[in-house]
Image (tube, rainbow, N blue to C red):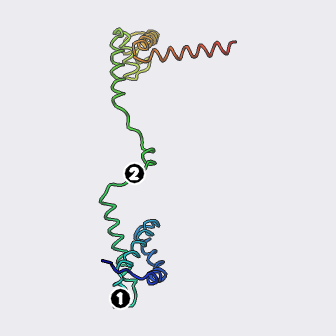
Amino acid sequence: MTTATTDERALAELQREHGAALFRFLLGLTFGDRQRAEDLLQETLVRAWQHPEAFDAPYDSMRPWLFTVARRLAIDARRSRQARPAEVSDVVLEGAPAQEDTADSAVHALDVREAVSTLSPEHRAVLVQIYFRGLSVGETAQALGIPPGTVKSRSYYALRLLSRNLPGYSSRSSTLSSASRDTASATST
């Protein structure tokens, strides 16, 4: 069973006569998207090729038929794009901010809480005032009723104790200090 198609010469004449106007019309329907307009123009001409009976219609020009087919194709294409989720390219994904891994921050918070609990109450009170409440040395001294020098001393020693008690921190600081010692000895020679 063969289906009748439009003669190639008639189709070429149709494209030559109405192609430019049809393309401008489709460009307006696609909001200036040349690629989409070209695709719709090609699909419209394929429909004309598939329906040779349209050439035998009682009207003088094929333009109304072509514009009607093109408009319906544009509407169908728009509806099908709206029915499915928007496509996301790799460029969009690379530019999107990375989601923070809350598991890592929760583990770090637990590590800090555990390390702070190993400090004496005096050292812990100083760190809580300075680092968790954001007070200055003077404000911390006033809040705890101790001299500012004592606040500085306690915070210094509390941080040293924390560096030993926090997992992974002491090995990093010892690696850094040995690397800085190596650099210092290399520059002194």
Mark 1 highlights which residue? Answer: 56
Corner quadrant of residue 137: top left
Marker count (numbered): 2
Q: Sequence-wise, which precedes: disc 1 or disc 2? A: 1
**Residue located 40% across and 83% down the image:** 63
Report the front residue among 152 and 39. Answer: 39
Q: Residues within 10 Å of mark 2 (few under 14, many from 20)?
A: few
Tag 1's secondary structure?
A: helix
Identify the residue shown where x is 45% and y is 67%: 32
The residue under the point 34% across, 31% down is 102
The kind of residue tagged 1 is Asp
Q: Position of residue 50 (x, y in %)?
A: 36, 77
Please determine whether, in this image, residue 78 is positioned above or below residue 183.
below
Return the residue found at the far right: 189
Q: Is residue 172 left or right of residue 184?
A: left
Q: CA distance from mark 1 to mark 2?
A: 45 Å
Pinpoint residue 8: horizontal percent, then vertical percent: 45, 81
Residue that badge 2 annotates: 88
**Where's the C terminus, which quadrant?**
top right
| Residue 60: x %, y % from top left | 39, 90
Question: What secondary structure is marked by label 2?
Answer: loop
Q: Is residue 100 above or below residue 110?
A: below
